[in-house]
Amino acid sequence: MSSMAIDLGLTFDNSYFEELEGFYVACSGDRAPSPELVKVNRSLAENIGLTNTDPGALAAVFSGSETPVGALPLAQVYAGHQFGGFTPQLGDGRALLLGEVLDSDGKRQDLQLKGSGPTRFSRRGDGKAVLGAVLREYIVSEAMHALNIPTTRALAVVTTGEPILRTQYLPGAVLTRVASSHLRFGTFQFFSARGELDKVRQLADYAIARHYPGLKASRQPYLDFLCAVRDRQAELVAKWLLVGFVHGVMNTDNMTISGETIDYGPCAFVDNYDTNAVFSSIDEQGRYSYNNQPVIAQWNLARFAETLLPLIDDEREQAITKASEAVTGFWDSFHRFWLSGMRVKLGLSTEEEDDLALCEQLLESMSDQEVDFTLLFRQLADDLASGNSGSQTLFNDAEHFLRWRESWLARLARESLSTAERVEMMNGANPLYIPRNHLVEHAIEAAEQDSDYQPFEQLVAVLSTPYTPQLDADDYARPAPESFGRYTTYCGT
Ligand code: AMP
Ligand code: MG
């Protein structure tokens, strides 16, 4: 590699480095033995102004081997409640914030490498990532983006040429991800737990300026900040439930202040509707099950609120009252987002008081029916369009569902939308393609075992327009074959 620093064409503007000394340690990545560029997300690259297209240069930078012009790499410190227990010291143990850039909309974006080597926060870990996990995060985070769900994004995948020991040796890789920031609930918890109130205030001011600038002029900015984060998290979790997403590891260090989904470790989408769905091998109690996600989001929010108490009011009792009210409000906020999302999924353009009951009855009719969550909503629209009733064939016993269908049709009849308008509305909200677990695994296996990236590329392409039927893509819309069996996911793989 030449000694000239690599210029990616990016204009870095590193506010975290410049403004938050003491919140990170400066460090750089490991030199990878033979970095190779596997994937660049072209549209995202364009959006952030990445103009360098030289694969060698991109592989060198996105493996962490070379620091590009303008970057000031660092590892952030944070803490977090993991499965309910507090760990006072976490941090970027296998990640490196390269720096920040302004995208084409003028929005500040973090560029982070994941898997670029150990940092001061690695504890007993090796700081590395394996190809399978990197591809998984790429596929699922980009799918979430296409589903209009706030999320970190995937910019690049590089293999390092270094075998990494897990249960066996696996190919090492680095993911470059883009996020509107990597501020977490756990970042606040780290300083709060150490009694460093000035730092909590500094962080809150930074977060408000970066994510909620409208609150700067507020008379109670920190309480409003808590409410704003609450509403973004409520909307996020509602959107997860509406597509059948199970995050799998909703520890407070994996909850962002921006309201973006972060850390696609043990996540998965449900195929058959199951309120108790759990995929993660270590979530034995079902703490992070499908239906428990709003409960946990609120619990996490309470932990975040605790860090802000001294900023909310000098009087502790007063602060607790105000913060509790804000946290309690999570439930209302969540239900509002969830119900308005369900209305669109069911083609409802007006609001009626009984809509919540109508939605809940549908879910009840789906319970224990082994009905594919994604396909059912598409089928409801197809049935409207065709006048058929294919949806009932998705149920083992459709009796309850058929009664529900009568009330739904009666409800639709009280609206003035044409069938065509309604079908369009529903198909614009109900994806045909989601990252089905068997497809994700197939893509990973082909890449890991045969260096065949075709299944990965095709899956990413199909998932980029999830609402539009695509030619020769029927297989991508189908549930897993019976032989795929129960699906288990793993953290930090
Ligand atoms: P996660 O499960 O990805 O949210 O990670 C939780 C914590 O463990 C974070 O502080 C990570 O940086 C750290 N961590 C996870 N995997 C590794 C690894 N291979 N090496 C070092 N630290 C890790
Ligand atoms: Mg994490």
Image (cartoon, rainbow, N blue to C red):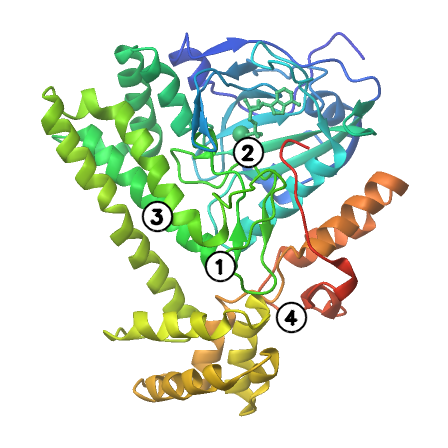
Tell me which numbered mark, 2 or 4, is placed earlier along the sequence.
Answer: 2
* Residue 380 x, y percent position in the rendering: 51, 79
Between tags 2 and 1, which lies in front? 1
Residue on which disc 3 sits: 234
Residue on which disc 1 sits: 275
Q: Is residue 202 above or below residue 295?
A: above
Tell me which numbered mark, 4 or 1, is placed earlier along the sequence.
Answer: 1
Residue at 55% x, 88% y: name it.
389
Between tags 1 and 3, which lies in front? 1
Tell me the distance, in whole angstroms, between the alpha carbons under discs 3 and 4. 30 Å
| Residue 435 visible to the viewer | yes
| Residue 456 visible to the viewer | no
Q: Amino acid at mark 1?
A: Thr
Residue on which disc 4 sits: 469
Q: Mark 1 and 3 residues: CB-CB less than 8 Å, in contact?
A: no
Residue 207: which numbered mark, if any?
Answer: none
Q: Secondary structure at mark 3?
A: helix
